[in-house]
Image: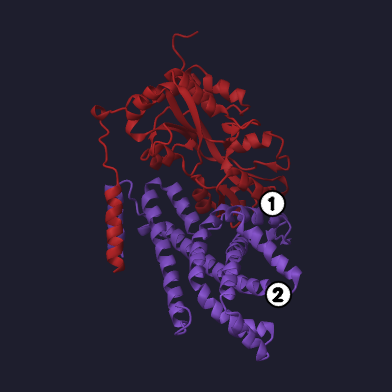
Chain colours: A purple, B red
């Protein structure tokens, strides 16, 4: 360990633009690690929540109730057609005013939803809007005759959705879903705008404090995202192949 | 596998490093200076969110004390002036990449920054660190910040100092507007920034329930910068001369007055020190 930090200290001395400061300075290392951890937590929370939104939204879209259908349609139009960065700022600064707060010292109004909370909400809704459409495409690919078969077997609409339509639709949707979730992980960097201490926030802080660490830190951000997204893609394709039904789809 | 990937990524990155250029006098190529003169236009990076040093007026033009300085530079070089607004977090990169030829952007003069951009003296201004906080809280001491959320601005060098020295939890936003909005929204107990900027905010009348209650710390001169290769060449020497002249003939003090900035002892001292011995 000592040898490695010595090595990077030496590199910083020999190449003034290549100061890998987080390889030998515990404080900066802590920032990077906490940033990576925050990015992972943010990504996981948004992945799960946006999938839930997608599944429920796609179900509601097929409802016979016109009000429910228009609510879902309105939701999709709003979140799909506005930039995620603007949504983040809007949620945090504008909507943040109206959420209940509690005060511990008479001034600070701690909102129940913190900036991390708003980032999760807004990014999940953003990706969720796309997921609804992705699942809808999958659902429409399930043959009408299959659905009629469930009906004749006495399944209710929600039973048919849960046990037959969704499992089949999911398999069709996976490639498109994969794309959207990859995008979602990358979009978490925008939470930087509302001061969520994720990887990019911490990295910018470091290279502001140590301009000599600019290139190494940018490189690190790239590598971390390549690895994170790589892991996501890998587990998604594992999932895809484990769910494969021989003879169904391609 | 991973190891080999990392190693090749590193090697690739090193290959991209520009060759270090000798900084001795005989290697002066004056590329940027010559480019500016032949193009007949200088591009200066300034702040657009730092009233009254550099900000947008009601018609959207960037104006302020540093813009007046940039205008004087362009006038003395006999070229046109183009202003580019920069952020604290990208101003040095803009200069390095040649997006701007000169940077006058409220930058504190720090040792590690001198390694990246061509900072030349004498420093034209100075400011310390202070906070703007609600009068209702009645802060009296930097220690009052311990463990509390404090809004800050990405790119300010004292964020880390305030965190490490006083244990404040700095929430750094990308722009001044967002950070100050967060203070108004009571997301933090104070806004840590340059005392000079806070002073002008307070005198603007828009922050009547707020005050600047602490003693300023870490007084730090400001610096303008030319590309680092030209620090000891024509451009650097020229800018040193410009700053010397501004100090000596009282231009900086006049600008301070024009833009309604509280007169600083720093400029008065410099003006005194550089007084022409033959002047009456």
Q: Residues within 10 Å of mark 1 (few under 14, many from 20)?
A: some
* Residue drawn at 74 percent across, 62 percent down: A100
Does residue A78 sit above or below B24 in this rendering?
A: below
The chain letter under disc 1 is B
Residue farthest to the front, as pictured? A145
Q: Is residue A207 found left or right of A187 in the rendered image?
A: left
Q: Residue at x 63, y 81 (%)?
A: A161
Indicate left or right for B67 with A97 as reference: left
Where is residue B34 shown, x and y percent of the image?
34, 25
For the view shown, which residue lies furthest in the left direction? B26
In the visual, does B198 lie left or right of B41?
Answer: right
Marks 1 and 2 belong to one chain: no
How many tags in the picture? 2
> Badge 2: few (under 14), some or many (20 or more) residues near its Cα, within 10 Å?
some
Residue behind mark 2 = A63
- Which residue carries the number 1 mark? B185
B268 up-or-down from B89: above or below: above
């Amino acid at each position: 360990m000592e040898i490695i930090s010595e090595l990077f200290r030496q590199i910083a001395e020999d190449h003034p633009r290549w100061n890998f400061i987080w390889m030998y300075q515990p404080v900066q290392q802590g920032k990077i690690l906490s940033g990576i951890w925050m990015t992972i937590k943010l990504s996981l929370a948004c992945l799960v929540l946006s999938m839930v939104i997608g599944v429920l939204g796609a179900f509601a879209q097929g409802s016979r109730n016109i009000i429910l259908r228009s609510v879902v349609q309105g939701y999709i139009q709003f979140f799909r057609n506005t930039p995620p960065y603007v949504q983040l700022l809007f949620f945090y600064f504008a909507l943040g005013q109206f959420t209940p707060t509690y005060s511990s010292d008479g001034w600070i109004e701690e909102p129940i939803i913190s900036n991390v909370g708003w980032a999760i909400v807004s990014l999940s809704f953003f990706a969720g809007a796309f997921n609804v459409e992705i699942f809808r495409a999958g659902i429409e690919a399930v043959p009408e005759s299959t659905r009629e078969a469930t009906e004749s077997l006495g399944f209710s609409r929600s039973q048919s959705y849960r046990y037959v339509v969704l499992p089949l639709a999911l398999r069709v949707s996976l490639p498109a879903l994969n794309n959207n979730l990859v995008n979602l992980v990358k979009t978490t960097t925008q939470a930087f705008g509302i001061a969520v201490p994720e990887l990019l926030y911490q990295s910018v802080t470091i290279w502001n404090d140590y301009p000599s660490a600019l290139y190494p830190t940018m490189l690190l951000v790239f590598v971390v995202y390549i690895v994170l997204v790589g892991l996501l893609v890998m587990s998604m394709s594992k999932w895809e192949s484990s769910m494969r039904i021989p003879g169904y789809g391609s | 596998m991973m190891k080999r990937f990392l190693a090749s990524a590193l090697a690739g990155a090193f290959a991209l490093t520009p060759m270090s250029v000798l900084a001795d006098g005989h290697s002066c190529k004056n590329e940027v200076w010559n480019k500016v003169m032949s193009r007949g236009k200088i591009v200066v990076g300034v702040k657009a969110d730092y009233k009254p040093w550099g900000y947008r007026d009601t018609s959207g033009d960037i104006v302020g004390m540093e813009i007046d300085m940039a205008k004087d530079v362009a006038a003395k070089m006999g070229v046109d002036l183009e202003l580019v607004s920069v952020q604290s977090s990208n101003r040095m990169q803009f200069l390095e990449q040649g997006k701007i030829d000169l940077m006058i952007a409220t930058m504190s003069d720090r040792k590690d920054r001198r390694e990246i951009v061509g900072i030349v003296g004498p420093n034209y201004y100075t400011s310390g660190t202070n906070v703007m906080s609600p009068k209702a809280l009645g802060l009296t001491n930097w220690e009052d910040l311990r463990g509390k959320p404090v809004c800050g601005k990405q790119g300010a060098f004292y964020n880390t100092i305030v965190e490490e020295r006083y244990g404040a939890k700095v929430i750094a936003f990308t722009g001044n507007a967002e950070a100050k909005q967060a203070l108004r929204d009571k997301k933090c107990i104070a806004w840590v920034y340059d005392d000079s900027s806070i002073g002008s905010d307070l005198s603007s009348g828009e922050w009547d329930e707020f005050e600047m209650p602490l003693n300023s710390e870490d007084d730090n001169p400001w610096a303008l910068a030319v590309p680092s290769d030209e620090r000891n060449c024509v451009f650097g020497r020229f800018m040193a001369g410009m700053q010397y002249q501004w100090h000596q003939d009282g231009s900086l003090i006049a600008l301070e007055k024009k833009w309604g900035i509280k007169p600083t002892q720093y400029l008065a001292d410099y003006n005194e020190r550089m007084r022409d011995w033959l002047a009456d």
